[in-house]
Every structure is written in C-alpha cells, then in structure tokens.
C-alpha cells in the first residue's frame, strides 16, 4: 500500500461523511470515520421502513462493509460531543472521553428533528429521521390496528386516526405510504375491522402541501392525496401533542395514538457546542470551499451546515446536496495536500421530488426544475434514488431489486417486534392491585 499522505477525521456516517471518506480512501489518505451507529442509513426511504414496504436491511448498510476494501479507513462507533480546533490541531472528543485528531476535520453529523418547542411533541410524537425512529413508528402503526381489531371501541378513542405534522416531502410521502398500507394491505389482514373509519390527516401551518414545489406540483399532490383518502388541515398549527392526540391552533382536537412529526430539522447538538460560527437553523456556516471561517482545515458539510453554491445561493438539506458536498470536501482536501488551490463548491442540481403514494410522484428535475407528475415523475424519482444509493453502495442492481419488490404490496416486514409497542389505553381499574 502506498504511503498515506495525510490524516482526516470525519464525523458522521451519512451521505456527506461517507461520500467524503470514500473519495479520500481512493487517494491513500488515512481516514477515521466516527458515528454513533455502525451503519449508514438511506434516510429518504425511512418512511417505507415505517410502513413495512422495506426492511431495515434495505435502507441500512454497515459502515465497515462499505469500507471493507479500503484499509486506510477506520470506522469507530462513538458519540462525538465536542470539537477542539486551534492553531495547534483539530480534534473531537467522545462521550467516553476518547479523543480523535487529524490534519483535517470534516464535520458531517447530520441533523435532528425540530419540534419548535411544541409542548409534548418530543415525548409523544414519532419523528422519522433514523432507523430506530422508523422501527418505532412501524410498531405503533401495526399495534393500533391490532388493538382496534381486538376492541372496536378503541376506534372512538382515536386508534385509527393517524396525524402527520408537516406537509413537506417527508410528511406527504409518509401520509401517502400509510394510505397505501390502509388501502392495499390492511383489508386482506383485518377482515373484521371497519377500515372506513381510518382517518389520515396532514397538519401544517402553510397554505399548501409541498411548499418548496411549484403551484402545479402542489395542486397535483393535493389531488392525489385526496384520492388516497388523506385529509388536509392547512393554515393550522399544532399547539400540543399528548399521549392521546393533538390540540390544533384553531382549538380543535384530534384523538390519536399515532402522531408522526415531519415538521422540519435543526442542527445536531454538536454544532452548538463546537464553538464554530453558526447561522440559520443552528447549522455551521460553510465558506464557499466548504471550510469553516478562520479554520482552513475544518470542513462543515451536509445537513449540519449552511452551504451555498458557487453563485452564493443557499442549498437545501437534501441527500444529493450532502453527497456532492462530501465528495467536494474530499476534493479540496486532496488539492490542499498537493499544494493546489481549493475551489468553491459547485452543486449539480438534481431537482426536487416527492412520492405521493405508490407509483406516483411529483418532480422538478434539473437546474431549471422541469416539472414532471405521475408515473413519469416516479421514474425520475427512481433514477435519482438509484444515483444516491450507488454513491454509497456501488450496486445499482440492488436498487433495481428493491424497486421490483416495492411495486408489489406484500408488506413482508409487517411485524411488531417488541412489547415496547404496547399502548396504554388506560383501561386498568385503578382499584385493581394485581400485577
């Protein structure tokens, strides 16, 4: 093996971190990749794990497996809690007190749900930003149907009311997938259950679904959601989430034991404790070349950073942006090592898109955001996700196999995994002292 020319610590095993580490590994750079999990998750498809369209193994791949052929990459499962950068070095410290340092530091620790200080949301809602989140939501979805099947009176208490907070892509895709689950799968499995009483509701303060999209795309998604049986409560906020439902800003309440939180993301705690310059959403401010101001050997990329393209336009928190930024950061590190000039990040716009139920999507493709709706948009959605997946797995055929399974309606992973999914309906007699 060729002599390694530099050392880089990468914090985060998402699109940005894996994209950066993979490119560096190909150029004999020693990389230490740190993440609290030992796997990379394909976050855009977590809602399909939550609705049993996919299994966890379809969206998560062990980090050590990704880098099995790259001996210059070390993977450590640790929780990074602090950053130390000065003229003498760059290092991070873990919750266990271990320190990792290198010639370069790449901060790509992703994001976390933003509950906007909504009372009860963090305790009672189901965010959808990790494999663990997807598993919890899947368990809850099937548990409420099981409970309602055993006791129909629970329907009056909201057992079959599913509330999705947020009308952005995550909320729309999740609501559409839940509707497909109810319409295509549940009738074959719960023959004694009155499925006409299932109510799926999207709640959002905005005036339309898919706010970042065009008016025509939003209108198409609205019509498609209506066809699937999804209710919309727009221009309406969530005042409180409880164990038994949600209180809305117009004073109404929806009884529910399944409140999905798709209300947005914010920077991870590490951004606030790093001492580095932060801006919108608490995210670190990345310079045009993706470094942090005043620290030319520290990079901030992915959802953890506020990044701009080469024209100064702010970039969205998307998987395609994160993956390209990771590769570009590696490119600039290699340029620096070789004594060449670093270059401003040039993002190749893949557009934006969202699934709206099985086999249907809205997409605005390319830099000019050419609009596509329906099955054609679904084909574009498949193509972009194949590109993203091949970037970390290098196996497009695996994605094609997944797509074939997805077009079916078997829901083979529709199992409840643990007793932790059991819902307390408050039925126990308070005078009953039996265990």
Image (tube, rainbow, N blue to C red):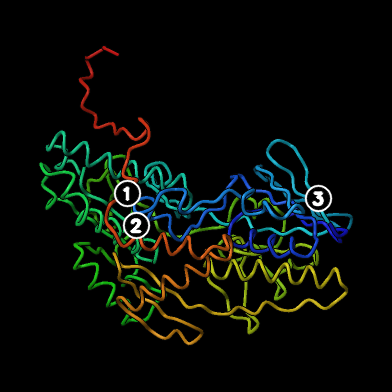
In the figure, residue 181 lies in which quadrant?
Answer: bottom left
Q: Which residue is mark 1?
A: 259
Mark 1: which secondary structure? strand
Quadrant occupied by the C terminus: top left
In the figure, residue 302 lies in which quadrant?
Answer: bottom right
Residue plotted at (15% across, 50% down): 187
- Say if residue 317 shows up in the picture: no
Do the numbered discs 1 and 3 sit on residues whose CB atoms are within 8 Å?
Answer: no
Do the numbered discs 2 and 1 sit on residues whose CB atoms are within 8 Å?
Answer: yes
Residue plotted at (33% across, 55% down): 238
Residue plotted at (47% across, 78% down): 351
Quadrant occupied by the N terminus: bottom right
User: On screen, 201 above or below 35?
Assistant: below
Q: Say which label, 2 or 1, has the lower sequence index.
A: 2
Residue plotted at (43% across, 52% down): 128
Mark 2: which secondary structure? strand
Q: Which mark is residue 165?
A: 2
Left or right side of 337 for 207: left
Across and down, in percent, residue 422 comes to 31, 32
Q: Say which label, 3 or 2, has the lower sequence index.
A: 3
Across and down, in percent, residue 135 comes to 41, 44
User: On screen, 382 above or below 411?
Assistant: below
Residue situated furthest top in the rendering: 434
Q: Give how far apart the Cα atoms at labels 3 and 2 are.
A: 40 Å
Q: Which residue is mark 3?
A: 101
- Say if residue 305 shows up in the picture: yes
Q: Give how far apart the Cα atoms at labels 2 and 1 are.
A: 7 Å
């Amino acid at each position: 093996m060729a002599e390694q020319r530099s050392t880089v610590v990468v914090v985060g095993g998402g699109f940005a971190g894996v994209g950066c580490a993979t490119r560096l590994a190909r150029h004999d750079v020693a990389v230490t990749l740190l993440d609290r999990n030992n796997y990379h998750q394909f976050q855009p498809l977590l809602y399909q794990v939550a609705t049993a369209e996919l299994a966890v193994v379809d969206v998560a791949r062990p980090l050590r497996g990704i880098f099995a052929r790259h001996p210059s990459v070390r993977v450590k499962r640790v929780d990074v809690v602090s950053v130390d950068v000065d003229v003498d070095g760059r290092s991070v410290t873990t919750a266990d007190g271990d320190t990792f340092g290198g010639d370069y530091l790449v901060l790509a620790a992703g994001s976390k749900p933003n509950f906007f200080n909504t009372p009860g949301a963090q305790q009672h809602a189901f965010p959808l930003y990790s494999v663990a989140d997807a598993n919890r939501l899947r368990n809850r979805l099937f548990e409420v149907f099981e409970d309602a099947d055993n006791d129909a009176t629970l329907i009056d208490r909201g057992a079959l009311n599913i509330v999705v907070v947020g009308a952005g892509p995550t909320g729309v895709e999740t609501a559409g997938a839940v509707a497909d689950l109810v319409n295509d799968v549940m009738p074959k499995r719960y023959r004694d259950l009155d499925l006409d009483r299932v109510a799926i509701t999207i709640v959002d303060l905005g005036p339309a679904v898919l706010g970042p999209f065009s008016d025509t795309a939003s209108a198409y998604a609205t019509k498609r959601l209506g066809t699937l049986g999804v209710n919309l409560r727009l221009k309406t906020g969530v005042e409180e989430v409880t164990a038994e439902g949600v209180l809305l800003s117009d004073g109404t309440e929806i009884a529910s034991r399944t409140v999905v939180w798709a209300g947005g993301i914010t920077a991870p705690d590490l951004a606030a404790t790093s001492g580095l310059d932060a801006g919108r959403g608490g995210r670190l401010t990345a310079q045009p070349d993706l470094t942090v101001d005043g620290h030319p050997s520290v990079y901030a990329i992915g959802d953890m950073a506020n990044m701009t393209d080469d024209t100064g336009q702010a970039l969205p928190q998307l998987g395609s942006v994160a993956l390209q930024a990771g590769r570009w950061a590696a490119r600039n590190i290699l340029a620096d090592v070789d004594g060449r000039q670093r270059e401003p990040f040039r993002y190749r716009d893949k557009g934006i898109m969202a699934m709206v139920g099985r086999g249907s999507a809205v997409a605005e493709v390319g830099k000019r955001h050419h609009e596509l709706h329906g099955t054609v948009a679904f084909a574009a959605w498949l193509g972009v996700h194949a590109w993203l997946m091949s970037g970390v797995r290098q196996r497009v055929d695996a994605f094609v196999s997944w797509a074939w399974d997805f077009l079916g309606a078997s829901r083979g992973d529709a199992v409840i995994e643990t007793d932790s999914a059991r819902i307390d309906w408050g039925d126990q007699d308070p005078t009953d002292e039996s265990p």
